[in-house]
Amino acid sequence: MSSNDTLQRLAHIIESRKPAQGGDADKSYVARLLQRGPDAFLKKIGEEATETVMAAKDIDHGGATPELKGKLVGEVADLWFHSLIALVHYGLSPADVMAELERREGTSGIEEKALRKAQHRDAAEKA
């Protein structure tokens, strides 16, 4: 079973928890976040991103102990989970992210960033 399968299954579960699909905010954390709207789950993404950074910094300063590595993995899992909620809310899926990563594969990050800046600049000039 691939990681993509796991992410896709989780996205389907999140989809089923949408209030419009019958998700019960009294029984489901995901349904509660979705019911509260983007501000709620986007705030969680910010919190989890910060906690991920802090966990990585703990490894930098405390050594790569199994406990600290486990904390980092847990924080990244929380970040991915809340990011999946955002994807589902906006009608996207893990497959969309995988396709973008595959598109970028083999491309220099520096070149890719420069291309995005040029495209953004061109769009701004046309506006």
Image (tube, grey):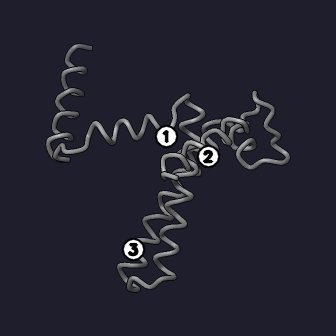
Q: Which mark is residue 103?
A: none
- Mark 2: few, some, or many residues within 10 Å (few <14, many ≥20)? some
Question: Residue under circle 1?
Answer: 94
Pinpoint residue 36: horizontal percent, then vertical percent: 71, 39
The residue singled out by tag 3 in the image is 57
Contact flag, marks 2 and 1 (Cβ < 8 Å): yes
Residue in view at x 45 percent, y 70 percent: 54
Seen as rendered, the residue at the extreme front is 1
Reply above or below: 42 against 115. Answer: below
Give the structural element (helix, strand or loop) at label 3: helix
Under mark 3, the amino acid is Lys
Please give the name of the residue rendered at 48% of the width and 79% of the height, measured from the top-left corner. 68
Measured Cα–Cα span from mark 1 to mark 3:
28 Å
Q: Residue at x 22, y 33 (%)?
A: 116
With respect to residue 43, does 116 lie above or below?
above
Residue beneath disc 2: 10
